[in-house]
Amino acid sequence: MGLKLHNTLTQKIEEFRPREDTVGIYTCGLTVQGPPHVGHIRSAITRDILVRWLEYSGYKVMTLENFTDIDDKIIEKQKELNKDWRIIAEENILKYLKACDILNIKRATFYPRASQHIEEIMELVKKLIDNGFAYEKGGDVYFKVRAFKDYGKLSKKSIDDLVSGARIEPTEHKIDPLDFALWKAAKPGEPYWLSPWGKGRPGWHIECSAMSMHYLGETFDIHTGGEDLIFPHHENEIAQSVAATGKEFVRYWLHNGWVTLGGEKMAKSTGHYFLIEDILKDYSSNVIRLYLLKTQYRNQIEFSKDRLDEAKAAYLRIQTYIHGFEKLPELAEPFMLKEFTEAMDDDINTPMALGIIFDLIKQGYEKESLEIAISVKYYLSVLGFAEDEPDQPINDVIDVLREVKAKLKDKKSELLDFAARDLWSRLETIKSSDKFFSNLVNVLLDIRNQLRKEKNYELADFIRERLARKHIHIFDKEIDVSTFRVDAK
Ligand SMILES: [Zn+2]
């Protein structure tokens, strides 16, 4: 047994065997002409969950995520906003890192930027020219695709397939339409660096080869990124790196599925996207994590508010369960669940792992058990959920429910069982936190009505008094019907 990962290169699920003690991971990050959208966050969460699972499994991990801070799109933005490209890049990098922190996404070990590695990039371009894989023309440098015999191995494209779609733009100087730019001559007014080929700047693909090999070595274990990067970006990364070193470049290629909107890829370039900062206004980071992890990383996710609302309701069920327990003793041990490990070892099957957590919660609602509660908390933290507090009004009602539970415990447990079952069945049907709140209060009202029928006025009054302290007032209409009102703030 052990971790198995799907490798795009072989199209197979393979046993993961790192080459060294420390697993090196490179992730293609943002081109920072704008703030991150949900698609970018999915890539980041894919890396996050992989790193968490590797570390949980005992591996040491070193991670790199680049920022493409110099590129045609950023130069366009500079003209559009009349703002220096460095400031545009910096602002968007900060927005991205802030969103990642809110979403409890583990930071990478390094976040290299293309503009800070021009020297390494130029070295690599020189090496490719020396090795006969690249040529300079008109101040540009191009990679000779036909010179690299394994070209197309990752994306499963043949040179013949590619020829039909390839063309030379009027601004380009390449000889073969298949060739791609390693270095671009600067046009007037564009940012540039001095190079052996004149004033210019790097092409997009070369930065990832230069930076990944600089930090992780010529051969490293895992490269991740969105599936849209397989071709041409990752295909070109392989060509550049192998042509320069003559060595294997990356051993496992992992690609996450798109986030789609109406079936189309969410993308900044088409204006077809939702920014993560807007989604975070309506949904907590744990809800967004639950929403994304409910789908295995390789599959596409259709973005929809309905699905986010479903995740919100599901998350409330988790929250209510966890907060139903007074401080959980740290010393108690969680259950070691073989199925959880098997699910995660099976190409990071997060939907299955989440299913196991929800099964635990269901058992927890049926039977009060500290071990179950501790296990739920433990496995949630393995999946990167942050500990959080429920909304204050909900928290208040849960506090009262907890007190009532403690009092009922000394008496007969049938009523408690009924209350727990009832709570569970009601939580099953909730859709929004508004209804959730009234459902929660209604559970207490029902328990209170039951107590009054049993002539346990002491405990019934206790519930009324405790809720009143939380600004929730009970009105008894008939013998077994009560309503409530919450004081306006
Ligand atoms: Zn890249």
Image (tube, helix red, strand yellow):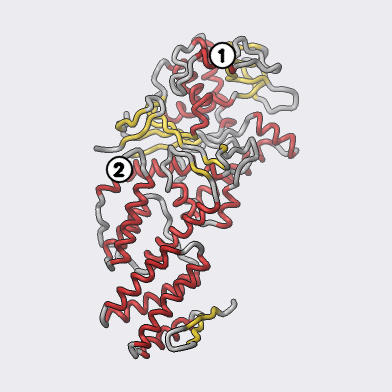
Picture quadrant where residue 202 is located? top right
Where is mark 2, residue-wise? 57
Please say whether residue 344 is visible from this viewpoint: yes
Q: Is residue 250 left or right of residue 475?
A: left
Quarter of the image containing the C terminus? bottom right
Q: What amino acid is found at the position of numbered circle 1 in the picture? A: Val
Quarter of the image containing the N terminus? top left
Say which residue appears at 45% left-offset and 12% top-offset.
149
Residue 151's tag is: none
If you read the primary sequence from the N terminus, does the residue marked by circle 1 or circle 2 appear first? 2
The answer to whether the beta carbon of the residue marked 1 is less than 8 Å from any atom of ligand 1 is no
Picture quadrant where residue 206 is located? top right
Q: From what the image shows, is residue 117 above or below residue 81?
A: above
Where is mark 1, residue-wise? 163
Say which residue appears at 48% left-offset and 39% top-offset.
300
Question: Decide: marks 1, 2 in contact (CB < 8 A)?
Answer: no
Q: How many marks?
A: 2
